[in-house]
Amino acid sequence: MSDLKRAAFYYANYGWPVVPLHSIKRDGGCTCERAGCGSPGKHPRTRYGVKDASRDTVELSRWWQAWPNANVGIVTGERAGIVALDIDPRHDGDKSLAELVREHGELPATVEALTGGGGRHLVFKHPGGVVHNRSNLRPGIDVRGDAGYIVAPPSAHASGGQYRWREGHGPHEMTPAEMPAWLLTLVTRGNLEDINADAPPAQVSAMSAAIMNERARRALAAMRKLRVDDHKDGSRRLFAAAAIGVRFGLDTDTALVTIREYLNSAPTPWKYDDADILRRLHDAERTCIRGEALNNEQARCAAPPGAVAPNTPAPEAFRPFPVDALPGHVRAFVESVAVATGTDVAFAALAVLVVIAGCIGNRVAVLVKSGWIEPAVLWGMLVGRSGTTKSPVLKLVTRALIDLFKAERRAFDDAMKEYTREVERYNVRLAEWKKSQRDGPPTDPPNEPERPTERRLLVSDITVEKLGELLEQNPLGLLLVRDELAAWIGAFDRYASGGKGSDQPAWLSMYDAAPVTIDRKSGKGNYFVERAAVSVLGSIQPGTLARSFGTAEREAGLLARVLVAYPPDRPALWTEAALPDDVAAEWRKLLEALLALPPAVDEHGGPRPRFIPIGQEAKALWIEWHDRHARELVDIVDDDLRAFYAKLKGACARIALLFTCVEVAAGGDAVAYISADAMRRAIAVVEWFKHEGRRMYAVLGETEEDRARRQLIEWIERRGGAVTARELTHSLQQYRGRTDAAKADLDALAMAGYGTWEHPAPGPKGGRPAPRFVLAASDAITKTPAGASATTGFGDGDALSGSACAEDDGGDWGGEYDGQPGHAGSAAGRTDRAGHRIAGPRGPAAVSAAIDDDG
């Protein structure tokens, strides 16, 4: 692990959100390649800059995997609990600070960094409330507070030097100090008119009290803006006020006085003694530190450095599937299925990949290197709640196979009829032969007719014993399709005496097309299949998924082998669209061509896969991706997610094999090697599955409270991002007749930073419009309309992207960064603080690159 990446991990664990910054090139320029960049090595690499800052180790690993030499930025403000001063000697910063110290007293020892350009960075504890970024507070002194960030050691400076912590003053040696009263006043008010340089300690104490009173005044104003439908005892109102007191950094005595004044001035005064208020203050402070009611690292409470919230981070926002990474005919079919069913293209894309793998089966396999062979086997799972039209997707994608199956069944029935007639004729010949053996010379008996075997590809509700029989008869492999995959998992122990999971080892072998021996339950021997290749496709509901894939299934790696598509819920609106006949015909033609791919022949005359090597150009792409992915995997802490990442290596090679087979199937050519184009497409698709897997495992780690909160946010998003409490009671069953509960839950979202209350002005006819809760917005990812795809670089469209290069004011600190106006990043849409999508504008500006380039 590089020093820069290690430092980023350290700061994140310390409690400081981190963002990757551009690097310094050998010639001293910036890696942004922008002519005349005014802040080389100091501005964010990510699209949304400081808004992307994170403490998530998976995200950090992904960033420094993509940009190993990225400088490290630390977010300042309430998110990190720090405020920083930039002392720039080039603009007389040292002189300005010395004058302030002479006039008002020494600064306390605090965390301090030395820049490569000769400057100093002094890091203090955030005082609570709002601290704005300020440039040139005094000549050569800048302030970085809320929504700001700093360049941190061991980043490289354009001068050729390196940022480093001053000896004895690093965050590993001390914690940020409280700002003295005079500095706090300067930082928060911008002037020191009321400060007497010769003030005695008592006057300084009075001044500190005045500052605390200013915070209390602002906190009281915030409390009076609360809209809480409370219980009869006022407990919700008290907790809300206590949380605001904690947020504004009030000391205990000031908080007691402020909360008491608020409660007494409420429409319905509530009487609490000091012990009650202290208990609620303690609860609010503990909640802020844990992040239970807040959104993890974006919490409004400034958690102490080193306090890392133990609850699971909110799931990442859904990314559009890179449909343009699919080969042409496949892409057209996927998009048509999505339009016909009114579903996200991710469902059809995953289903199509698994069906293609099932059709190829044991005909070919990819030779990654000597001793490493990956078969054409995939397991896929469409995840969605009831009513998300997963079943119609499965039906359309497999309809061609059903037609082929029916044709094979008719041929098999005809063969069985002929076989029955042959058996009758054989029995006659056998009787005649037996009679001839009594009187004549010995002769050979007649040949018994061979029973025909049914060519099968599709199977559904099947025991592993029957599966073994079918695999012996169909050595090229099978495709299991189940509308409800929970039944597939539940059948593992249907006839097993050994308890749940008795069939599990056999299924794990089938994922790798490995040898399988299956004992017959009747005790009549066993089935042996040398290459048991079975692809699996089905759907499942999120709650069922968590219950079905229990500890045993996860520890065995069963869930890790399954690719998932879990797009956000969307209304299943009526559509007259249907799957075009020509598109369906091309899809069937492709499947027939894949089923006709010739396998190799083993030494016994039976079929075996032809081993396809990776082409030279594709190998270079594969090695670069493989090593990058391997470095990401090493840094993953969660065992389940780590197991999933580990299986993606093989999945990438398998999907590249599928795309190569699709390339040549239409022309009837033999598959010679994995092409670079197929590998490039496969990497794009697997990167999407990687992100989708992270989302799914985050959902699996949610508490009931987390899940209810996420589902409420998603519901509000689908309504356009705003709702009144009354609309909530009319729309969701759990709030029917419970306006107070609806209001309380929306208040909880507001306190957690997911949104705010807006109070519309009266209309022309007067009246008092109901307050509306509006989800908080940040420029993040955008929606892709049903059936449409985002530009990925494989098609002919122009990819839109936001610029990540912003000039600061020339100091050693990054400025506030909100993205460049006019780019897709700022115009395309918005998400709430948890990364959940909110409907944004439609049209060209709402389309962003769908293939993630790891940053």
Image (tube, rainbow, N blue to C red):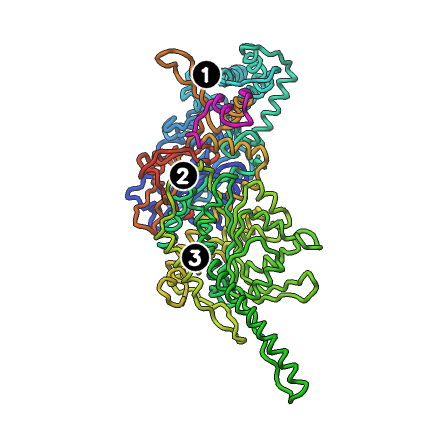
Magenta includes 726? yes
Nearest the camera: 193 or 667? 667
Write down the residue under mark 3.
624
Q: Is residue 827 left or right of residue 364?
A: left
Q: Magenta residues?
A: 717-740
- Residue at 67% over, 87% down: 439
Looking at marks 3 and 1 on the same chain, the residue that comes earlier in the sequence is marked by 1
Of marks 3 and 1, the one in the foreground: 3
Above-or-below relation of 456 to 696? below
Looking at marks 1 and 2 on the same chain, the residue that comes earlier in the sequence is marked by 1
Task: Decide: few, some or many residues near mark 3? Use Cα within 10 Å; few <14, some 14-19, many ≥20.
Answer: few
Write down the residue under mark 2.
781
In which quadrant is the C terminus drawn? top left
Q: Which disc number belongs to residue 196?
A: 1
- Residue at 39% over, 59% down: 589
Q: Mark 3 is on which residue type? A: Glu
Of marks 1 and 2, the one in the foreground: 2
The Cα atoms of the two marked residues, 3 and 1, are separated by 63 Å
Nearest the camera: 591 or 417? 417
The Cα atoms of the two marked residues, 2 and 3, are separated by 27 Å
Task: Decide: few, some or many residues near mark 2? Use Cα within 10 Å; few <14, some 14-19, many ≥20.
Answer: many
The Cα atoms of the two marked residues, 1 and 2, are separated by 51 Å
Instruction: Give the secondary structure at mark 2.
Output: loop
Magenta includes 597? no
Q: Mark 1 is on which residue type? A: Asn
Residue 5 in sight: no
Residue 561 in sight: yes
Nearest the camera: 66 or 475? 475
